[in-house]
Image: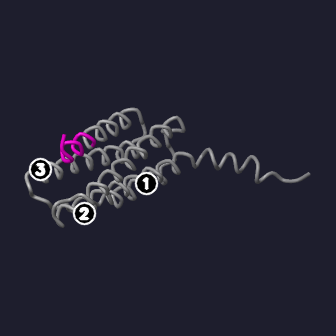
Amino acid sequence: MDIYEYGMQMEQESEKYYRDLAAKCPDTGLNTILNMLADEEVRHYKILQSFKEQQCSVPESDVLGRARDVFAQMTRDADFACGGAQITFYEEAQKIERKSEEFYRARAEEAETEAQKQALLTLAKAENRHYFLLENIIAFVQRPQRWLEDAEWNHLEEY
């Protein structure tokens, strides 16, 4: 299997993982973000497919900006419905993103042309942004738990 086929397979698996995770999360905001990440993986798949056909260019993604808007809306909504049990799935998704980033960086070192190298590095940066986004999802999901913990242990009045 060549690097493009392998990368395309990784992107398909990542898309499926995000779609499955979105289906398990009833919160509309997180569901939207997870589906945006799945759509990004489809986009990466198509980019790799074009590499195979020797058309190497990678347009920038605006997934972080769109996700920021969703997070802003979610913080305004008092009804947040996707809890701590999901954190394990997000952490697993982070591992997948890190593995993809490392794969693209390693393949960039082996690229035959500068255009291929830059395109693969752009994909690596995109996977890094996905990792960062997942890190923010984890922090957002954990916030109520951390606040409760802080309120319980750090804000007690002394008698």
User: Label 2 is placed on what type of residue?
Assistant: Glu
Nearer-N-terminus badge (3/1) = 3
CA gap between label 3 and label 2 equals 19 Å
Residue at left 27%, top 50%? 40
- Tell me if 65 is positioned left or right of 6 in this view: right
Q: Residues within 10 Å of mark 1 (few under 14, many from 20)?
A: some
Q: What's drawn in magenta, residue-wise?
A: 1-10
Of mark 1 and mark 2, the one earlier in the sequence is 2
Residue 77 locus on image (x, y percent) = 47, 49
- Helix, strand or loop under label 1: helix
Q: In which quarter of the image is the N terminus?
A: top left
Label 3 sits on a secondary structure element that is: helix
Q: Which secondary structure lies at badge 2? A: loop
Give the percent coordinates (x, y) of residue 121.
Answer: 28, 61
- Residue ID for mark 2: 60
Q: Distance between the residues labelled 1 and 2?
A: 21 Å
Q: Residue at x 52, y 45 (%)?
A: 141
**SS assignment for the magenta stretch, majority:** helix
Q: What residue type is labelled 3?
A: Lys
Q: Tell me which amino acid carries mark 1.
A: Phe
Residue labelled with disc 1: 71
* Badge 1 vs badge 2, beta-carbon distance below 8 Å: no
Q: Which of label 3 and label 2 is nearer to you?
A: 3
Residue 47, which numbered label? none
In the rendered image, residue 68 lying in the magenta stretch gets the answer no
Residue at 44% x, 40% y is 92
